[in-house]
Image: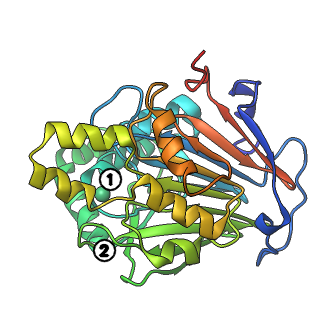
Amino acid sequence: MRQTGFAGRLAVAAGLVLLLPAACQPAGPETPVEASPAAPLMRVTILGSGTPVPSRSQTGTAILVEAGGEVMLIDCGNGCTARLAEYDPGLLTEVDHVFLTHLHSDHVVGLPDLWLNGWTQGREEPFHVWGPEGTEALFDGLRTAYDADISIRTRARLAAGGSPLTVEAQNLPPEGRVIAGTGAVKVTAFPVVHAGMPAFGYRLEYAGKVVVISGDTTATPTLAEAGQGAGLYLMEVLSPAMVGYLTSSFSEARANAILGLHLTASQAAGVMAETEPGLAVYYHTVASCSTDGALLAETAETYDGAVMVSRDLMQIRLWGDHLDTDYLGEDPTDCD
Ligand SMILES: [Zn+2]
C-alpha cells in the first residue's frame, strides 16, 4: 500500500521535474531496480520544514524517506505525528526506522507522540531508533515519563497489537557508521558539527539513488564527502530572514551564538558547488513567498544549480532518470 496508495493524493501538477545528469546517478551498491511509472525508487516527504519557532505552517524537523519497502524517518520534531497522519494515517504504525540527527528538543519532541500513537493503533514491529549518545537514555526516560498512561492502557487493554511498545534504541558512535537492519537501503550516519554535541547527517542509498540530509551543522568537510553523487541533498540553512529575526529579537551575544551553529546560505551553496546534487532543498528554515527570494539570491552567488526552499508536505520523488517534486494539497510556494 505504502508504495502506491498515497501518490494519488498529491496534487497532480508537479512543481518541478528535473532530468538527473549522469553524475547524479552513481552505480549503487545494491541490485538496480527498474523505475516503473507507478513507483519512484525513492520518495522523500518533508513532513516538517520549520525551526524551533512554533508555526502551524512549518512544523519541527521531520523527513520521511520511503524506499525498498522501508519507511524511515529522520528526526521527529513538533507536529511530526500529525503531519505523518495528514500524509498517510496508515503509516502511523508503519515507520520502521527513526534516525536522529541530534538530541536538540526541536528534533525529537514529537517522538513520544509517534511512538505511543503507533502502539495504541497496533504497531506490530519494534520501534527502531538510532541517534547519538543519549538516544537510549532518552527512551528510558520516555518510558518512565509515560508509565502511568502505558500501565493504564495496558491494564484496560486499550492498545491494539501485541508487543508494539518495544523500542530498540541505539546510540551511534560519534564518528558515525553504516546502520544495519535497513534492508536494501544503505543508511550511513556521518558526523557533523553542531553545538558541541554529537550530531549526524545521513546518507541513504537505494538502487543507485542517493539522498543526503545534512542535519543541523556548521560548515564541515563531511558534508561534501557524504554528498558525493547525491540526487537530492536536503540542507539546513539560516535564511537571511532567520538571521534578521535572530539579530532583531535576541541580544547580540545570543544571536551570534545561534548563528554560529548553522549553515549560512553561502556556506550551504559552497557544499552544493562541491557536490552538484541533482536538486538541493533547504529545510529547517523560515520560508515564505516574501523571504525565499533573498535566500535563493544569496545561494546563487555561489551556486547556480537547482535549489528549492521547502514547506511542510513537500515531496521529492527520485525515478530512474529524473526526479520530480510535488505538494500534498496546494503548493504553498505558488506565490502568484
Ligand atoms: Zn540543533
Residue 264 lies, in percent from the top left, at 39, 55
Please tell me which residue is depicted at 44% across the width and 57% down the height of the picture: 163
Q: Is residue 187 above or below residue 68?
A: below
Q: Is residue 35 above or below residue 249?
A: below
The label shown at residue 247 is none
The colour style of the image is rainbow
Q: Residues within 10 Å of mark 2 (few under 14, many from 20)?
A: many
Q: What amino acid is found at the position of numbered circle 1 in the picture? A: Val
Please tell me which residue is depicted at 50% across the width and 40% down the height of the picture: 47
Q: Quadrant of residue 164?
A: bottom left
Residue identifier under label 2: 198
Q: Is residue 332 above or below residue 91?
A: above
In this picture, residue 257 sits left or right of residue 110: left
In this picture, residue 21 sits left or right of residue 272: right
Please tell me which residue is depicted at 62% across the width and 28% down the height of the picture: 328
- Using the rendered image of the protein, determine whether residue 122 is visible from the camera's viewpoint: no
Residue 31 lies, in percent from the top left, at 84, 73
Q: Quadrant of residue 335?
A: top right
Residue identifier under label 1: 108
Judge by depth and name the residue closer to the eye, 269 or 140: 269
Circles 2 and 1 in contact, beta carbons < 8 Å: no
Which corner quadrant of the figure contains ligand 1?
bottom left
Judge by depth and name the residue closer to the eye, 140 or 52: 52
Q: Is residue 111 above or below residue 291?
A: below
Q: What amino acid is found at the position of numbered circle 2 in the picture? A: Pro
Q: Secondary structure at mark 1?
A: helix
Residue 321 lies, in percent from the top left, at 87, 54
Label 1 within 8 A of ligand 1 by Cβ: no
